[in-house]
Image: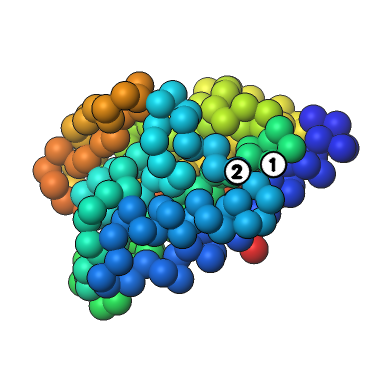
Amino acid sequence: MDKSEIIKMKQACKLAAQVLQYTEKFAKPGITTLELDKIADDYTNSIGATSACIGYHGYPFSTCISVNEVVCHGLPGSYVIKEGDILNIDVTVKKEGFFGDTSKTIKVGQVSNAAADLVETAYQAMMIGIGAITAGGWTGDVGFETNKFVTRKGYSTVKEIGGHGIGREFHMDPFVPAFGKKGKGERFIPWTCFTVEPMVNQGTEDFEEHSIPGSSIKYYTTSDKKLSAQFEHTILMTDTGYEILTLI
């Protein structure tokens, strides 16, 4: 990306972070996930952006909201959020042809100690993965450090789903997994963007795939029905390191 494109990319990412920050305030007991999605969509439109999710390969909603055992791509619907839930809100906005992508797992009220530890582990896993990014480095560097941290905490990382390149397209190369070997995978290219978004499961890494009517997008749940948590930032690779674009 050139300088003008980077400016637009930073703007899209800032707006995505704003939408997530605004929406999470409403994630309280008694609200449905569909109501949360509507809040996010209305706010996205109010700040001059559009949701990148609506209509993407037939996906019908503005956000993905993944509750408890849902790993990712959870569909907003009639589910009423309750005390003790954990839920990931995944927001992607489009502005002037560029995409910004971020997500966060939210603790609803008082959650169990086990749930709280999982959520904290998922956040730290993302930050440790980001910290492994170096100029001229590899995607496997990120995955290695992420998986090492998560497994030492007694949890598992989802292997088949992970981060991705982003910019003028929602999803593109490279694939940024939550496991790997140092010096393996794909090299990071300066002045490109990608996401780091490890999905951390309380139990097994295995998941079940579920169809979404009218869409080629799938959503996933843990096969043992234990909890899953995830955090996501969009990263700009530079000549000398990286910049997190979805911090706010």
Quadrant location of the C terminus in the rendered image = bottom right
Quadrant location of the N terminus in the rendered image = top right
When the figure is inspected, residue 28 is found, relative to residue 234, above or below; the finding is: below
Q: Position of residue 59 (x, y in %)?
A: 40, 32
Residue 50: assigned label: 2
State how many labels appear.
2
Residue 188: assigned label: none
Whether residue 55 sits left or right of residue 97 in the image: it is: left
Residue at 28% from the left image edge and 30% from the top image edge? 212
Give the amino acid type for the residue marked by disc 1 in the picture.
Lys
Between 87 and 63, the residue placed more toward the observer is 63
How far is disc 1 from disc 2 in space, using C-alphas?
A: 7 Å
Give the amino acid type for the residue marked by disc 2 in the picture.
Thr
Residue at 57% from the left image edge and 24% from the top image edge? 172
Q: Closer to the N terminus: mark 1 or mark 2?
A: 2
Between 103 and 44, the residue placed more toward the observer is 44
Crowdedness near tag 2: few (<14), some (14–19) or many (≥20) residues, C-alpha within 10 Å: many
The image quadrant of residue 206 is: top left
Please say which color scheme the image uses. Answer: rainbow
Q: Where is residue 17 in the image (x, y as percent from the top left)?
A: 59, 56
Q: Where is residue 60 in the image (x, y as percent from the top left)?
A: 39, 36
Pointer 1 and pointer 2: residues touching (CB < 8 Å)?
yes
- The answer to whether any part of residue 21 appears in the image is yes
What secondary structure is found at the residue carrying circle 2? Answer: strand
Residue at 39% from the left image edge and 59% from the top image edge? 36
**Residue tagged 1:** 95
Between 88 and 204, the residue placed more toward the observer is 88
Crowdedness near tag 1: few (<14), some (14–19) or many (≥20) residues, C-alpha within 10 Å: many
Q: Where is residue 202 in the image (x, y as percent from the top left)?
A: 22, 52
